Image (cartoon, helix red, strand yellow):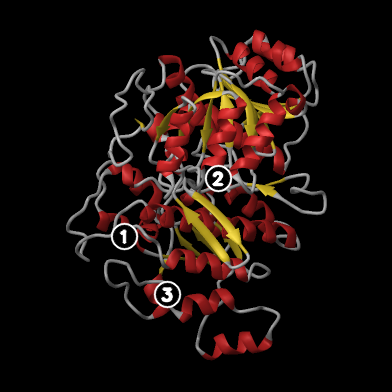
Amino acid sequence: MRALLSVSDKTGLTPFAAELARRGWELVSTGGTAKALGDAGLAVTGISAITNFPEMMDGRVKTLHPAVHGGILARRHRPDDLAAISAQGITPIDLVVVNLYPFQETAKKPGVAFDELIENIDIGGPSMVRSAAKNFRDVLIVVSPGDYDSVLHQLARPDGPSLDFRYQLMRKAFMHTAFYDSAIAAAFMRIETPEKGDGSNFPPAPAKIRPVPFSHHPQPRTLRYGENPHQKAEWTPRDDAGKWTVHQGKELSYTNLLDLDAAMRIVLEFTEPAAAVIKHTNPCGAATGPTAAEAYVAARDADALSAFGGIVGLNRPIDEATARALTSTFIEAVIAPGLEPGAADILATKANLRVVTTDFAVARTGPFADTGDIRTILGGMLTQQSDHVDEALDAWPSALSGQSTIYDAVFPKVVTKRAPTAEEWEALRFAWRVCAHVKSNAVIFTARDRTLAVGAGQMSRVDAVNIAVAKAAGKLQASVAASDAFFPFRDGLDAVAAAGATAVVQPGGSKRDDEVIAAADEQGLAMVFTGRRHFRH
């Protein structure tokens, strides 16, 4: 039996390899892995002895060879495959132990040079992983040191490793390479095209290099089902993106996780205590307050009917007062940065309530903060940078000259004759941070610290206004409104004014901005342009 070992993460490697050798396995290895095993006194066959070709170009080419991949891919039940490799003097490889160059760790280094990133893109490693995973019925593929013990246990079985075990290793292997490629793709999405092809104008700013976090040990968890009971689903948490701890309640579902993510994204916009209540990834209520409990009650009561059975996000640990508020009505799940003593006992009175905590500091400033977005479509895969409401990170001014024009480069800016009052400025900034998380087309109405009505996901902006007005039942006098994209015609602005709003925030940028500004001036509204759209599909 032959094992090929080539790893960057050498945790537990030597005792694992030593046990394989004790059981009669031939160890084949590359570069630094071969040296580590040799230094431990183990007999190792170098990869060049297998390929009859030297490692070259600083190790860029070493395993990309038929003697390696033929030995991995040969199907043991196919006499023609076995005859083919025998004719070429190729020995089957029965176990592949590979984890990949530390691209993510390299990308995290402050001021890392562009060429260093390039050199940490693994080529041969993913190829071997994929080859072994494809032939999982005959070849064990191991990408995580955490699996070494279970591999040894399975090898000791009278019939050898079970098919189910082989299949689980295969799934983990493809997840490993998927996360790895995602990290690379996301990193280079954040780096501008170099002026020269040799990377001489790098290193780029460290903030530009924030790849999708991936784990060396992804552990997919089977969910009850997907969006619907007939759809199977899995969840693969990222070990380095803030561990999600489930303290109680029913098993998390696919839609629970989507809604928890949506809730968390909203409350991360705020440094003061904040809460969001989510239904189908849209906020039915969001609020800030002196305490988390008060923020939650305000968010819930913004649309109490829709909040029933909702998902809650809090940016403060759950204390006893918040726990009592959460259990006073029916909600499905809550996510927060912590759980204080005494709160757990109160939450436990609602046995089915899912309670999740995670490290919000990592989510706000760590690699998770800018993972990028990855979605599949029937025609392939889409990736994009994450959307952040950076223009509202700092407090907006309480007064601004009304003399600015729509052509000024400074945002946010007043484009109407009347500037917002101090309270309106505060409300507009609150509205803008929440509106960015509502499905488009979106128009929302808020006070300075809470939503009053949310018009989400409509085909026209006027429809979004009308839905929000209908839900508000006349509560929008002296409110402010936010629109995630510009008003293409004045009808949307007129509808906002008719609802009772006194100030509006929108990106601007329409061919009819002058017409919309004139409509706002006619009705005495203050209007602010941000210069940035926040569509959410």
Give coordinates of residue 115: x percent, y percent: 25, 58
Give coordinates of residue 396: x percent, y percent: 37, 23
Mark 1–mark 2 distance (CA, rounded to whole Å): 33 Å
Q: Nearer the viewer, mark 1 or mark 3?
A: 1
Q: Label 2 crowding class (10 Å Cα cut-off): few <14, some 14-19, many 20+?
A: some
| Mark 1 or mark 3: whose residue is earlier in sequence | 3
Q: Amino acid at mark 3?
A: Leu
Q: Amino acid at mark 2?
A: Arg
| Mark 1 or mark 2: whose residue is earlier in sequence | 1
Q: Say which residue label 1 marks.
A: 118
Q: Say which residue label 2 marks.
A: 536
Give coordinates of residue 450: x percent, y percent: 58, 20
Mark 1–mark 3 distance (CA, rounded to whole Å): 18 Å
The one nearer the camera, 151 or 417, is 417
Residue at the image position 64 percent from the left and 27 percent from the top: 453
Mark 3–mark 2 distance (CA, rounded to whole Å): 43 Å
Q: Say which residue label 3 marks.
A: 64
Residue 455 horizontal side relative to residue 427, left or right = right
What kind of element bears circle 1?
helix
